[in-house]
Image: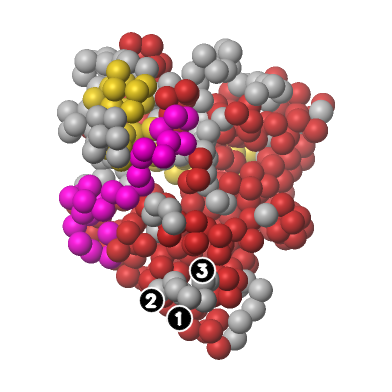
Amino acid sequence: MALTVETFNLRDSDDDYRRDPYPMLKQLRDQRPLFQNPDGSYVVTRYEDVDKILTSNDVSVEKSAEYRKIMGDGPILEFQLSAMTTWDPPAHGKLRGALAAAFTPRAMRTWEAMIAETVDDLLVEPRKTGKMDLISDFSAALPLTVICKMLNVPTDMWTKFRAWAGSITTSLDPAAGPDIIALADQHANEWKEFLGAQLNDRRKNPGEDLISMLLANQPADEPFSDETIIHNIALLLSAGHETTTALISNGIDNLLDFPEQAERLRNDPSLFTNAVEEFLRYDAPVQMGTRKTLKPIEVSGGTIPAGVIVWTVQGAADRDERMFPNPDVLDVGRKNANKNIAFATGIHVCLGAPLARLEARIALERLVLDFPKLCRDGEPTRHLRTRFRCFGSYPVRLYG
């Protein structure tokens, strides 16, 4: 039975919704822009409303009581309460400031050559065989190899990092159940042990890596706890992997559905930077976030009361025709594509967004320009999640 606004429940969405949420999200934007879930939480889907919530001083990201109901009191809850994404000012600003130096435009210029080299290395074998799995061989391997290099840990750690990152993201899904939380607890213990050992090593042997930088940049009067440093390195690992992996693979999937747009990029490579913004708008890796209201907030369709959870659905906002004409059409030359809020906005805009954009641009340039006949080599499989939109496998042929 087709979903309607009368039967929809974000915490109990079906696989059809997870495969293609956009028709349902359009119904919500048009008919119920302020939607209340059966659990009492609210869902906003229009661009101006999502933007308002994300930039409001009348909301909080501190949701410990709500997380505890879902996650219990185990290691994954400790992670969530340590991650700066769940900290309000002023604590949030101190930690973000300590990490920000790694993601400035100057830092991106430093990382660019290393990213390009990593892309080339990952494509050596696929160039020979003429095929690969876009996810495991390339779009997941790239950001995880890059983060290994940024942390100065062995690059063969990326397979372990991928499992840890997957647990972080799935534990935040609206439909996360006990099995998911149990695995996330196990993985949280694993990364605490590994990153704890790395932290001890950097205290003795500081370098130019992210862990050393965070140790050097912490406030002298109130240094961060080991748990804070460890869990926020894990946060960067997760955010950097999941979003970039999905951005690259979703982008290729979009171009295979709109081959004329791939041809535009080959004819005018200067469009790649804008194209990355359009991929973010059209098929956002992170579909939604959450906030808790501190005061009542007026939005389209009514008033959100104080003290409730609000789901901000960026994936819906970036398909809002009030902001983006013809939103269901991919247009790599779209004039306002950079107005997308796929990485959120406000003080909690994704810290690693510049790195994700850079990795995606370099990777997509190489794939689109070097392999004009790239095509699917079988049926892709999608991770059926509500909050994160990505593929699990995506076999491709490089030469048609």
Looking at the rendered image, the quarter that the C terminus falls into is top right
Q: In the image, which residues are magenta?
A: 51-77
Q: Which residue is mark 2?
A: 193
Residue behind mark 3:
157
Q: Mark 1 or 3, which is nearer the eye?
A: 1
Q: In screen coordinates, is 277 left or right of 282? A: right
Q: Is residue 133 visible?
A: no
Q: CA distance from mark 1 to mark 3?
A: 14 Å
Horizontal and vertical percent position of residue 240: 53, 53
Residue 26 is a magenta residue: no
* Residue on which the image places disc 1: 197
| Quadrant of image for the N terminus | top left
The residue that appears at 34% across and 34% down in the rendered structure is 311
Q: Earlier in the sequence, mark 1 or mark 3?
A: 3
Instruction: Determine whether label 1 and label 2 are within 8 Å by CB.
Output: yes
Tell me the crowding category of disc 1: few under 14, some 14 to 19, or many 20 or more residues within 10 angstroms, Cα based.
Answer: few
Q: Is residue 93 left or right of residue 358?
A: left
